[in-house]
Every structure is written in C-alpha cells, then in structure tokens.
Amino acid sequence: MKEYVIGLDLGGTKISCALADVSGEVKAEVNMKTLAQEGEGAVLSRMIEAIEKVMEEANISSHLVKAIGIGSPGPLDAHKGIIITTPNLPFKNFDIVRPIKEHFNIPVYLDNDANVAAIGEHILGAGKGTNNMVYVTVSTGIGGGAILNGKIYRGSTSNALEIGHTTVAPNGPRCNCGNIGCAEAVASGTAIGKRAKEALESKVETSLKNYDNPTSYEVFVEAAKGDKVSKEILDTSLNYLGITIANIIAAFDPDMVIIGGGVAQGGDIVFSKVREVVNTRCFKTMAEHCRIVPAALGVKAGVMGAVALALSEIE
C-alpha cells in the first residue's frame, strides 16, 4: 500500500499545500490566500481546508498520509509546535500543531521556513547526497538553515542560523533588529534597494535615475547594462554576502552552501563574487572542498521543504 505525506507552507499572504508520495513526487497541490487579517481561527481553518483539498484532489484518504509538515515564519517553538509570534501572521503563542493533529489524526511537525527550505534542498534539491550543508536565503532579509551530520540543526532555542543578524560591518548601517552592521543591513535585497534610493537622492550620474523607486532587481538590470553606480552597489553588497558565507564555512566546514532567494536570481555575478571573497578569506582546504551553488527548488522551496520535513520525520 502506497504511503504519502503532506507539506504546508504558511506565509503572510499565501498558504501553499502539497501532497506527495514518499519519493517526494507531488500528486496534488493547492494555493490559497492566507487572509491573516481575519485572525488565528480563520487562518487555522484555511490551513485545514488546504490539507483536505489536496487529499481530495489526489483521491487519497487520510489513513494513507503518514505525516504533515508545516513551515512557518518564526520565532517559534518547533518542539512544542507553537508559533510564538511573527510580523505578518496573527498568531501569538499559538499551538498550531495540536488542532491539526487532532482534526486529521495524523502526526504533525512544525519548523521555521528557513529550516524547512534547508531540509527540502537536502532531501529533494541541490543538497542531495551531502552530509553537512548550509542553506542561505537572500531576499528581503537573510536567513538560513543547516544540515549537520545529516540532520537539521535547530540550536538550544530552535532559532539557530539567524545568519542575517551576524555582524559583518561593525561600522555599517543599523539593522531593523536594532543592531549595527548585520549582514541583512548590508547584503540583502532590501539593502541593495536602499543603496539605489540613496543614489537617486544624490548628484551622482546613474541610469538608476530612470526609475522612480528602484529595487535590487533594477540594480542588477542596470549593472548588466554597464551602469557604474549599480556595479559599485552590487560589488559592495555582494562582498558583504561573501564575508557572511566565508564566516559560515569557517564555522561549519560544510560540503556545500546553497544560496536561494531573490538575490540569488542575479546569477553569475552573485556566485562569482561570493566565491572570490570566500577564496580570499577562508582556509584553502575548506574553500576548495565547499561547493557554493544556487538553490534548486526555487519558488517551491517553502512547500517542498514542508514535504521534506514530513518525509524526514517518517524516516
């Protein structure tokens, strides 16, 4: 008899849910709006509805589903199954696991979105076959998750790998967390966009002034066209990203660092700069051993990570 798992990615604007067999092949997928403004109970009901819909779409009864994995923004208590708080969702110290487990009579597992993405890349994506790997997402912010000795590393409070809030520029700008010089404040997509807006407000000549509200995407576009200011912005930010990755390699000595998120979509310019900095700053043996690669799961990282979380628990 075939067995299945369900993964659910809980986001501030969208709930994504997928039912997959134990090889990770998706048999049904559902997306719906979170509608977080309606409150805890309404979002929980919508999560249950999404799970019911994927089983119905795949024509699978609940007794064939061995586990449900949920990825959520944090902070949270993965062990207790509680979402402590998160800016874009209405939950506060909310036991999200218990009501879903009781409704379906299926084991339910919770982890933060960066960890589930790491698990997803390890089991189903670019990190297949590695024993030690670190996943880093670089977009609005910077986050990460680590697989050490084949298992997800959560830390003592389940909040390990807050990579974006490691200090890489002690004299740099203040981060939203309150600290000065965090990686997130100098190397994220948001940071790149801020540097572009600063250029607009100055007298410097740049093609970025053709945009009313340039983001990191426009900086990559104009840099590719040869705009000097855009190139300088990227060189600075990607240098800090390289320092961040070099610190990760020095700390964990992984087989692989996988970079995902919007900034990773910048392509060769991102990876060549990061590798250059890593080769300059890391011990040669560690730098040569560690592969630095783009994420394989792309926009599906959240929901496929939740599927992988469920798979890892039944294994």
Image (cartoon, rainbow, N blue to C red):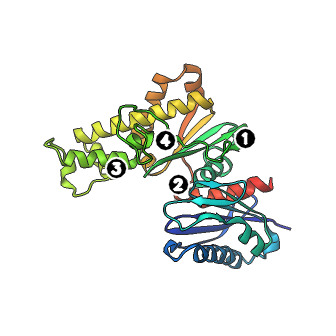
Query: In the rendered structure, are the residues bearing label 2 and label 3 in contact, judged by CB atoms less than 8 Å apart?
Result: no
**Residue at 43% over, 49% down:** 265
- Which is more N-terminal, label 3 or label 4? 4
- Which is more N-terminal, label 2 or label 4? 4
- Residue situated furthest right in the rendering: 1
Name the residue type under label 2.
Gly
Nearer the camera: disc 1 or disc 2: 1
**Residue at 55% over, 20% down:** 283
Nearer the camera: disc 4 or disc 3: 4
Q: Position of residue 189 (x, y in %)?
A: 39, 48
Q: Which of the numbered marks, if any, corresponds to residue 298?
A: 2
Q: Badge 2 local density, few (<14 within 10 Å), some, or many (20+)?
A: some
Q: Position of residue 143 (x, y in %)?
A: 52, 46
Mark 3 sits on what residue? 216
State the separation of the CA atoms marked 1 and 2: 22 Å
- Which is more N-terminal, label 1 or label 4? 1
Q: Which of the numbered marks, if any, corresponds to residue 165?
A: 4
